[in-house]
Amino acid sequence: MAIDNIFLEIVTPTGVPLRERVNELTAPSVAGEFGVLPGHLPLLAALRTGLVTYKQDGKENKIAVHHGFVEVVNDTALLLTERFAKREDVDVVRVRKRLKEVDDELDHWTGELTDPRRAELIEEEQWLATQLELIGDPPLPMVREDTRYVVAHAEPPPVEELAAESQPDENLTDHK
């Protein structure tokens, strides 16, 4: 008998806010959005802040998740995330007010780009914007670089290394 659904479970530090049988789901990862259907191959991915969409009997549902991880195995999708919100959880006035405060602080930032406080503000900005997107009233797109993975003293590779990698490997071509 073919399985026609996926068990979706979302776990946060405060509990398990969602356990549902779904027909399919899409989620945001750091490498882009991905979809899961019954019978999906095992998957482990890093989540980014965004919307998870899932279908149950033809009805589409959306929820907001913060960053975390997702594991898909044996028709079970387990999302471990810092935060979770349903549409009815969003207080539009509070979210818009806080988003303005965070944007103002980031717009006038004078500290180091790799300062942990700046990274926290960017993450909060992304979370607030995702909540507004969940209710269908997203703010204007804003691009702020996430400096979490920036190495303070990174050096570019040597020119010789770049030049060597730009040469085709004759063993991989049929041109002789």
Image (cartoon, grey):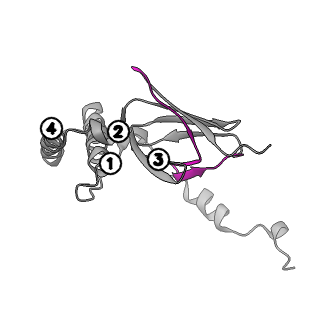
Task: Give the residue at mark 3.
Answer: 155
Nearer the camera: disc 4 or disc 3: 4
Task: Give the residue at mark 2.
Answer: 86
Lateral position of residue 71 relative to residue 100, left or right: right
Is there CB contact under 8 Å for labels 4 and 2?
no
Q: Amino acid at mark 2?
A: Lys
Label 1: how many residues lie within 10 Å, few (<14), some (14-19) or many (20+)?
many
Task: Give the residue at mark 1.
Answer: 134
Q: Amino acid at mark 4?
A: Arg
Q: Residue at x 52, y 54 (%)?
A: 58
81 is higher (above) or lower (below) than 170: above
Q: Residue at x 40, y 29 (%)?
A: 82
Task: Give the residue at mark 4.
Answer: 94
Is there CB contact under 8 Å for labels 1 and 2?
yes
Label 3: how many residues lie within 10 Å, few (<14), some (14-19) or many (20+)?
few
Q: How many marks?
A: 4
Element type where label 4 sits in the image: helix
